[in-house]
Image (cartoon, rainbow, N blue to C red):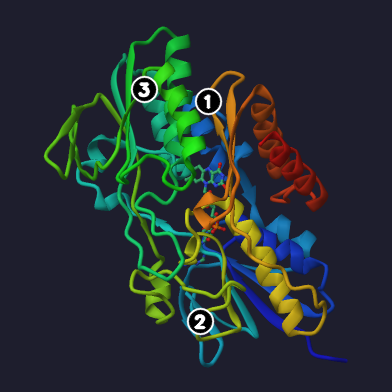
Amino acid sequence: MKALKKIVVIGGGFGGFRAVYKLQDYDYHFEVTLIDKNLYSIEKPALPEVAIEGKSEDEVEIEIPPVLRDANTAWEEAEVVKIDPKNQIVYTNNNKEFEYDYLIVASGAIKAYDEIKGYEEYGYSVCNLKEAKKLYEKLKDFKGGNIVIGAAKSEFDTHENIPNLKAPCEGPVGEVAFMLQYKLNKEKIRNNISIFSPSEILFEDVGEKVREEVGEIFKKRAIEVYANKELVEIKKDSVIFSDGSTLKSDLTIVLPPYKAPEFIANSQLGDKKGFIYTNENMQHHLYKNIYAIGDVNAITQPKLGHLAILQADVAISSILNQEAIVNEPKEYKPEIFCIMNMGGIEATLIFSNVLYGGKYDIAWHSPIAKMMKLSFDTKYNYTQGHMPPDFIDNALEDIIKKLA
Ligand SMILES: Cc1cc2nc3c(=O)[nH]c(=O)nc-3n(C[C@H](O)[C@H](O)[C@H](O)COP(=O)(O)OP(=O)(O)OC[C@H]3O[C@@H](n4cnc5c(N)ncnc54)[C@H](O)[C@@H]3O)c2cc1C
């Protein structure tokens, strides 16, 4: 009998789960091990609801070991500290070693809160469970005033034909602004919301049409937008930018800079900023048996769960092809797809690929978009990180394109 090939997956987030579930269908070819430093996988797109609507932890956390029992995959709760790409070994902080034939790195990005001066004392955020819950507590006794929301600048290496965004995930900035305004208005708490972007233009990852339509909603709701603002410091009652300007703020909510996990630099697998640069099959440019998917990959711009899923599918199809199991190569066709919750029954679905030279640039503002977001979140959690079946995704995409 042919020996099973060893696949190690680092990280059980959107990308890692998708890869593990896809590999489940081929367990007679592969022996899969998932390593994650946390026992729970967090559904990050639902964190603004934890912070603003009081959604419970249970609804955004998925315990990893039961997922793997179903997927016939071994599990290790440990932090990866180094990879030896020549000898094909992963090292973890519990002094274990994992040999691999194929490695899939899906470890996401680090959110560097400590790089923002004043964050610890006066800043709030929604990028992990701890921060989302801290904001929820703060809002319980928020008496009203000026609110400033924005993304700090991230730095990425430059690669040909890859967009280099200063704010790698700006959707949550708009989402938090809309949701918070809805909540505070409903509770009759005075609020004056401003949002800022380090980029020349807010939402630089979509096209003119989406920007105009969402911009109109900001205008209608009197949410002030400031572009080209690089955050320098958060103070008790203001926010300071690199051009010397300030905004008064009684509550400052930020998305921190994105950094690459340290073990990639320790393993000399990263680009100048430590992210893993791959080809369009998600293979490392030097080591073709190392794949990177999701936020950790340098070609992932913006850093979106939707792209992590597309990349996982491409990586798995490439491994199946290399092993001569299935020869149906999947092409990487990046696109922005997300739903911005706006509080109440409102949401805007955004589907755009102009950043990658495509022609779609759609913003669909509708209660149906809200229903789609709620049902996706519930299903993702209930089915332990399974995405909707491909035929539903394809049908949805067709409908959205017709809307255009
Ligand atoms: C507030 C917010 C809202 C968002 N909304 C949307 C949205 O609406 N739509 C969308 O498409 N995207 C959205 N995103 C982006 C999306 O959440 C990320 O792009 C996505 O989670 C990336 O998936 P990933 O698999 O690359 O990494 P992650 O989901 O971050 O998972 C990485 C995993 O790796 C583990 N890990 C990290 N380092 C190590 C290590 N050294 N050893 C072992 N394990 C490790 C972590 O514990 C984690 O479980 C949002 C992000 C935020 C913060």
Q: Earlier in the sequence, mark 3 or mark 1?
A: 3
The residue wearing badge 3 is 223
Depth check: give the residue in front, 194 or 82.
194
Which of the image's four quarters has the C terminus? top right
Circle number at residue 265 = none
Establish if 268 lies above or below 383.
below
Say whether residue 347 is left or right of residue 277. Answer: right
Number of other residues with Cα within 10 Å of mark 3, as a class: few under 14, some 14 to 19, many 20 or more? some
The residue wearing badge 2 is 285
Task: Give the structural element (helix, strand or loop) at label 1.
Answer: loop
Number of other residues with Cα within 10 Å of mark 2, as a class: few under 14, some 14 to 19, many 20 or more? some
Say whether residue 59 is left or right of residue 66. Answer: left
* Residue 174 placement: quadrant: top left
Which of the image's four quarters has the N terminus? bottom right
The residue wearing badge 1 is 342
Establish if 366 lies above or below 47.
above
What residue type is disc 1 on? Met
Residue 47 shows in this picture: yes
Task: Give the structural element (helix, strand or loop) at label 3.
Answer: loop
* View extreme (right): residue: 1
Q: Earlier in the sequence, mark 3 or mark 2?
A: 3
Residue at 32 percent of width and 59 percent of height: 155
Residue 13 shows in this picture: no
What residue type is disc 2 on? His
What residue type is disc 3 on? Ile
Q: Are marks 1 and 2 in contact (CB under 8 Å)?
A: no
Residue at 71 percent of width and 34 percent of height: 375
The location of residue 107, given as percent across then percent down, is: 51, 64
The location of residue 59, given as percent across then percent down, is: 63, 37
Residue at 14 percent of width and 35 percent of height: 245
Q: Are marks 3 and 1 in contact (CB under 8 Å)?
A: no
